[in-house]
Image: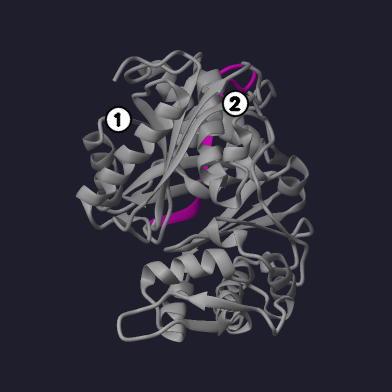
C-alpha cells in the first residue's frame, strides 16, 4: 500500500455478523476535528464470535473486502487503521495512584507518572492493558479535580479506570488485519469509540448509558460526570433473536436475518394484526405466509430479555437511579422499528437511538445508522490522535511522546 497523507484516517469495526470499514480525511486541526467521510463499506462475516476470532481465513477475507471497497469509494489507499475491540474478554477495574510533584506546579509528566503508578499492577499472564483513563484527581487531599495540569501542590493522586483485554484475542485480530495487508495503529474499546460518535457533552456529564445491540454481544457502558464509569458485555444479543426466528418460522439462518431486517419490529403493539408477509419457500413446501404480528412477538420477547439484562448490569453498577440523560441505543439492533418504545418500557428512562453525524462532512448518508456508531467513533478517535501527535505517521511514535501520550491518553481524559 502507498503511504497515507497526513490527514487521512481509517477505521475498522470487526463484528460478529459484519465488518465495517471507513476512510476519512481530517478537515481541520481543532481540538474537536471535523472528519470528511471519503469511503464506507461493510462485508458480512461469520469469522468472529463474541469479539474473538474463530476463523482467521474468513475474518481476513472480510477485512480485505471491506477495506478494498472503502478504498475504491474513497479513491485513496490506506495502510494504518484504528480497530475496535469488544466482547466478553474485555475487563475493567479502577486503580489508585499517588506521586509527589517534582516542580512548583503539576506538569504533564506528573500526570503521566501517576497514571503509570496506577497502571502498574498485575493483569495476569493472559491479559494486557488496553486503556488507562484517569477519572478523578486529588491534589494535597483536595478532591474533585478534573484537570490538574498547571495547579500547585506537592502530592498528586488519581483514580484510573483500567481496561484490559485478552492478549491472544488481540494478537489474533492483529494477525487478521496484517494478513489483509494493513497495520493496526491502535486498538480502541468500542464503547469509548461509540461515545465519541453519539453522545453529547451534556449526556456525558449528567449520566447516561450506551447499550450496543450487536449480533454476538450486547455491550453496556455507563458515563457520569464526564467520564466512563463502567463497561460490561453480555452474550445475549441479536444472534439469539435470529435463532428464535429460525425455529419459530422454520426458515434458514440467512433467511431469518433478512426477514428480521425487512419485516421485523421490536414492539409488538405497533404492528397491525392484519399485516402478512411472504416466507421464503423451501424444498417440499409450497408458498407460505406469516402474520407480521407473530414475527414481532418473537422479537419483542427476546429483545425485552436482552434489554432487561442490560438494566440488571446498570443496577449492579449502582447507576439505575443516576442516569437522568437516559439510554442511548447503538448497534444493528438499534435500527429495529419499535426499539425505542420497548426501551422506554424496560428502562423507565429517556431512550433514543444513537445515530452518528456531528462533526462529519462528505458522504455522511453512508454512516447515518446506529450500526455505524463504532466505526465513526473510531474514525473520530483517529482524528483526535492525529491532531494530538501532529499528524498520522508511519511507524511508532518516539519513546518520549509515547511515554506521555500513550499511557495518559490526554484526549481521552478531556472527553471522559
Q: Distance between the residues labelled 2 and 1?
A: 21 Å
Give, as a single range, the part of the protein colored magenta. 90-107
Q: Is residue 104 magenta?
A: yes
In this rendering, the answer to whether 146 lies above or below 342 is above
Total numbered badges shown on the rendered structure = 2
- Structure colour scheme: one colour
Dot placed on the residue nearer the N-terminal end, 2 or 1: 2
User: In terms of image quadrants, where is residue 393?
Assistant: top left
Tell me what residue is drawn at x 35 percent, y 17 percent.
Answer: 394
Q: Mark 1 points at which residue?
A: 182
Task: Locate residue 192: give its quadrant.
Answer: top right
Q: How busy is the neighbourhood of tag 1: few (under 14 within 10 Å), some, or many (20 plus)?
A: some
What residue is rendered at 52% in x and 45% in y? 374
Residue placed most toward the observer, 115 or 155: 115
Visible residue check, residue 102: no
Percent position (x, y) of residue 199?
68, 45
> Residue 100's spot in the image, x, y percent?
54, 29
Whether residue 178 is visible, yes or no, is yes
Q: Is the magenta stretch mostly helix, strand or loop?
A: strand
Q: Reply above or below: 244 against 379.
A: below
Alpha-carbon neighbours of circle 2 within 10 Å: few (<14), some, or many (≥20)? many
**Quarter of image, res 291:** bottom right
Label 2: element kind: strand
Q: In this view, does 324 lie to the left or right of 399?
A: right
The residue shown at (40%, 83%) is 250
Amino acid at each position: 500500500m502507498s503511504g497515507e497523507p497526513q490527514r487521512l484516517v481509517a477505521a475498522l469495526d470487526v463484528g460478529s455478523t459484519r465488518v465495517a470499514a471507513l476512510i476519512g480525511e481530517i478537515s481541520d486541526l481543532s481540538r474537536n476535528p471535523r472528519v470528511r467521510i471519503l469511503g464506507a463499506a461493510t462485508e458480512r462475516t461469520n469469522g468472529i464470535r463474541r469479539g474473538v476470532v474463530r476463523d482467521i481465513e474468513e475474518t481476513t477475507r472480510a477485512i480485505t473486502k471491506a477495506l478494498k471497497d472503502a478504498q475504491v469509494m474513497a479513491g485513496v489507499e490506506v495502510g494504518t487503521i484504528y480497530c475496535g475491540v469488544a466482547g466478553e474478554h474485555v475487563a475493567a477495574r479502577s486503580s489508585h495512584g499517588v506521586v509527589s510533584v517534582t516542580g512548583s506546579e503539576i506538569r504533564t509528566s506528573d500526570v503521566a507518572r501517576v497514571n503509570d503508578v496506577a497502571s502498574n499492577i498485575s493483569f495476569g499472564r493472559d491479559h494486557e492493558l488496553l486503556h488507562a483513563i484517569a477519572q478523578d484527581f486529588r491534589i494535597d487531599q483536595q478532591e474533585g479535580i478534573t484537570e490538574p495540569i498547571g495547579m500547585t501542590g506537592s502530592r498528586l493522586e488519581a483514580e484510573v479506570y483500567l481496561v484490559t483485554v485478552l492478549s491472544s484475542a488481540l494478537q489474533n485480530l492483529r494477525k487478521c488485519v496484517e494478513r489483509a495487508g494493513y497495520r493496526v495503529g491502535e486498538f480502541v474499546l468500542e464503547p469509548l469509540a461509540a461515545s465519541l460518535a453519539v453522545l453529547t457533552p451534556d449526556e456525558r456529564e449528567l449520566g447516561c448509558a450506551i447499550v450496543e445491540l450487536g449480533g454476538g454481544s450486547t455491550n453496556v457502558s455507563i458515563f457520569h460526570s464526564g467520564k466512563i464509569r463502567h463497561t460490561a458485555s453480555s452474550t445475549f444479543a441479536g444472534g439469539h433473536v435470529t435463532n428464535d426466528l429460525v425455529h419459530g418460522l422454520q426458515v434458514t439462518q440467512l433467511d431469518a436475518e433478512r426477514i428480521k431486517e425487512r419485516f421485523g419490529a421490536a414492539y409488538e403493539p405497533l404492528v397491525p394484526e392484519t399485516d402478512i408477509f411472504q416466507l421464503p419457500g423451501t424444498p417440499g413446501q409450497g408458498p407460505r405466509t406469516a402474520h407480521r404480528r407473530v414475527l414481532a412477538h418473537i422479537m419483542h420477547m427476546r429483545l425485552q430479555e436482552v434489554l432487561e439484562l442490560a438494566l440488571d448490569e446498570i443496577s449492579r453498577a449502582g447507576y439505575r437511579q443516576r442516569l437522568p440523560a437516559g439510554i442511548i441505543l447503538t448497534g444493528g439492533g438499534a435500527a429495529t422499528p419499535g426499539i425505542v418504545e420497548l426501551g422506554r418500557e424496560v428502562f423507565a428512562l429517556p431512550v433514543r437511538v444513537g445515530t452518528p453525524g456531528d462533526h462529519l462532512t462528505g458522504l455522511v448518508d453512508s454512516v447515518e445508522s446506529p450500526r455505524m456508531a463504532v466505526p465513526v467513533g473510531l474514525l473520530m478517535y483517529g482524528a483526535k490522535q492525529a491532531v494530538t501527535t501532529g499528524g498520522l505517521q508511519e511507524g511508532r511514535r518516539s519513546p518520549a511522546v509515547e511515554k506521555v501520550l500513550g499511557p495518559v491518553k490526554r484526549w481521552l481524559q478531556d472527553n471522559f
